[in-house]
């Protein structure tokens, strides 16, 4: 078997060597939830999750925990050509399934570009059929353009990393599609609808900027009002919601901060409040993250909230914040001079 070389492989190593050498298998856990004595559905669900996690952690020696790379590889590679019938409900998410598989293989160091040319050509042909005549990608061949599968398709091309793949993207039509879903007035000004006539939220705004940045089609016209839109979505808790007035949410907080990082406008939100909110989402006993206040720990939200910290960490130094602010002022000045 080829030696794994991906990001996860570098962190985990070739085999599951003991990370700890405990005297006994019982794990010392942090205290669980503290309540004021008032039982609610949320507190009872949380207590049950803590009970299940405690049983699992008490019965499993830390040195036995490892990642089954070969089983994951078999499952993922099989999914590239054949999916169970249950996946029919995800017919509008086929580029996402492709991206999840490719990204997992890449992280595991099991995606070999040199020996996957035939698979790559097949993937390019599939994504080309998903590309809408209006620009952007749909959830499958013949489906209307939507920002979510557009992001997944673009990221799949990034992983494959071939010029042949990038040639299928019509960049001008892509730009036209992105501009067609941009809100230019009202409370949601600066945001992007996920599709023509669809909902406008922080997710769509991040996806637009991520795709435009990768394809090198970011323009002042595209980013106008984006920072202000994201700033209006930050709540009193510190996190970011889908739109103004919505509850702070792990996924939207990641998307909002990532969007601001792309356009270098993190000054649009209160970073200290955002960091405080994000750290409070980690559950003391389970170790993972919840996505919203008073919710249960969740592996999906652990990804979203966990991803906030690499984005915000470089901004914690006051001098780095000042530099970012200076760059923003310089960019604004340059744009004004150009328009004049």
Image (cartoon, helix red, strand yellow):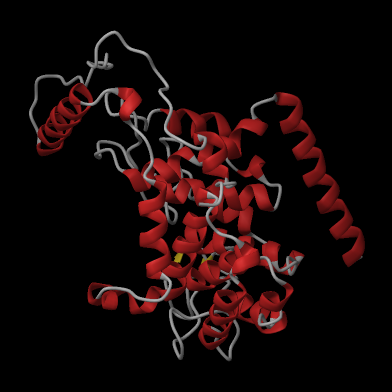
Task: Identify the image quadrant of residue 302.
Answer: top left
Residue at screen point 73% across, 65% down? 218
Q: Tell me: 206 left or right of 98.
A: right
Task: Identify the image quadrant of residue 166.
Answer: bottom right
The outermost residue toward the front is: 1
Q: Position of residue 106 (x, y in %)?
A: 54, 55
Q: Does 20 appear above or below 192?
A: above
Residue at screen point 61% across, 67% down? 115
Q: Does 206 appear above or below 30?
A: below
Q: Position of residue 301 (x, y in %)?
A: 37, 45
Residue at screen point 51% across, 64% down? 204
Q: Tell me: 321 left or right of 230.
A: right
Taking depth in this image into account, of 334 and 255 the one nearest to the observer is 255
Q: From this viewpoint, is residue 121 visible?
A: yes
Image quadrant holding the C terminus, namely bottom right
Taking depth in this image into account, of 283 and 118 the one nearest to the observer is 118
Q: Tell me: 270 left or right of 296.
A: right
Taking depth in this image into account, of 22 and 326 the one nearest to the observer is 22
Q: Position of residue 59 (x, y in %)?
A: 18, 25
Residue at screen point 37% across, 33% down? 281
Q: From this viewpoint, is residue 270 visible?
A: no
Q: Position of residue 225 (x, y in %)?
A: 64, 60
Q: Does 230 appear above or below 42?
A: below
Question: How many callouts does the rendering have?
Answer: 0
Q: Does 334 appear above or below 38?
A: below
Task: Identify the image quadrant of residue 235.
Answer: top left
């Amino acid at each position: 078997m080829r030696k794994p070389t991906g990001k996860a492989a570098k962190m985990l190593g070739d085999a599951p060597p003991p990370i700890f050498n405990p005297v006994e298998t019982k794990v010392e856990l942090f205290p669980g939830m503290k309540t004021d004595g008032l039982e609610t559905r949320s507190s009872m669900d949380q207590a049950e999750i803590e009970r299940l996690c405690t049983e699992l952690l008490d019965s499993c020696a830390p040195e036995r925990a490892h990642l089954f790379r070969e089983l994951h590889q078999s499952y993922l590679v099989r999914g590239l050509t054949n999916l169970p019938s249950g996946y029919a409900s995800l017919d509008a998410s086929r580029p996402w399934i492709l991206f999840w598989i490719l990204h997992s293989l890449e992280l595991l160091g099991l995606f070999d570009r040199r020996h996957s040319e035939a698979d790559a050509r097949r993937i390019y042909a599939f994504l080309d059929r998903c590309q809408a005549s209006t620009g952007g990608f749909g959830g499958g061949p013949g489906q209307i353009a939507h920002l979510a599968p557009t992001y997944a398709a673009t990221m799949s091309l990034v992983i494959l990393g071939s010029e042949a793949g990038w040639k299928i993207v019509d960049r001008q039509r892509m730009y036209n599609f992105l501009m067609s879903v941009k809100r230019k007035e009202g409370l949601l000004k600066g945001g992007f609808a996920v599709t023509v006539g669809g909902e406008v939220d922080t997710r769509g705004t991040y996806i637009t900027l991520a795709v435009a940045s990768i394809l090198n089609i970011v323009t002042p016209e595209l980013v106008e009002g984006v920072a202000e839109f994201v700033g209006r979505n930050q709540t009193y808790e510190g996190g970011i919601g889908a739109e103004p007035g919505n509850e702070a949410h792990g996924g939207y907080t990641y998307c909002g901060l990532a969007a601001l990082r792309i356009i270098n406008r993190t000054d649009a939100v209160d970073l200290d409040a955002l960091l405080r909110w994000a750290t409070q989402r980690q559950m003391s006993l389970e170790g993972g993250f919840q996505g919203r206040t008073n919710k249960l720990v969740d592996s999906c939200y652990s990804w979203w909230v966990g991803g906030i910290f690499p984005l915000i960490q470089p901004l914690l130094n006051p001098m780095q914040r000042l530099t970012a602010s200076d760059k923003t002022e310089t960019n604004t000045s340059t744009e004004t001079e150009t328009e004049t």
